[in-house]
Image (cartoon, rainbow, N blue to C red):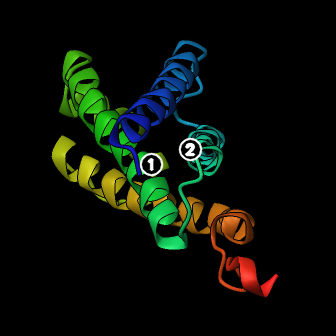
Amino acid sequence: MKVSRIIINGIIIFIGIGLFFLLMEKLGLGDKIYLRLVNFIFVIYGVNRTIKQDYEEHIDGYFTNLSSAFFTAFTSLILTIFAFIAYANARGGEEYIHTFVNHYIFGGTPSLYQFCIGLFIEGLAASAIVSFTLMQFWKDKVEKINKVDDVNHN
């Protein structure tokens, strides 16, 4: 697991999500909750890129690669939450949140920070789902459980 790879791929995910979010805002589609599912494409791309790069450098082990995948998604999540807080504050804070909060499942009128905690929990779940799902694809490539590596037993 290389920390620099995790950070770089996390930043790539963050940039993709950020640009997509800004495009949705510009087109007036920020209230369309189903479009948020497109975020998965950026997360899948970045997490898969991390696992693929680990594989190409012969970094084996299921849990090593799973950890690397999850921390890549987690890095992008942290960057995205802090950027969203800054963006929301620049756009009016609580008033900005209340313009589209009815389209989310939070109910009531959460504060900016309550809203971000909800997004954080949602992001953690998405990070885990994407990481575990991609590892199901990569597990036979990165885990050498049933292979004999000893020269005398080939």
Q: Amino acid at mark 1?
A: Ala
Viewed as shown, does residue 9 lie left or right of 42? left
Residues at marks 1 and 2 touching, judged by CB atoms closer than 8 Å = yes
* Residue placed under numbered mark 1 in the picture: 73
Image-based side of 65 in relation to 135, left or right: left
Q: Earlier in the sequence, mark 1 or mark 2?
A: 2
Seen at 23% across and 32% down, the residue is 85
Number of residues whose C-alpha sits closer than 10 Å to that of mark 2, classed few (under 14), some (14–19) or many (20 or more): many
Q: What's the residue type where badge 2 is placed?
A: Val
Q: In this rendering, is residue 108 above or below 49?
A: below
Instruction: Name the residue rendered at 44%, 48% in the picture.
Output: 73
Which residue lies at the image location 47% right of the left edge and 71% below the top edge?
63
In this view of the protein, can residue 10 be seen by the observer? yes
> What secondary structure is marked by label 1?
helix
* Visible residue check, residue 35: no
Q: Position of residue 78 (x, y in %)?
A: 29, 42
Q: Secondary structure at mark 2?
A: helix
* 128 relative to 110 in the view: left or right: right
Taking 1 as reference, is 30 above or below it? above
Relative to the observer, which residue lies in front, 128 or 59?
59
Of residue 34 and residue 17, the one placed in the foreground of this image is: 17
Q: Position of residue 50 (x, y in %)?
A: 55, 44
What residue is pinned by disc 2? 43
Foreground pick, 103 / 16: 16
Give above or below for 17 relative to 43.
above
Quarter holding residue 96:
top left
Question: Residue 136's spot in the image, x, y percent?
Answer: 69, 71
Q: In the rendered image, which quarter contains the C terminus? A: bottom right
**Residue at the extreme top:** 26
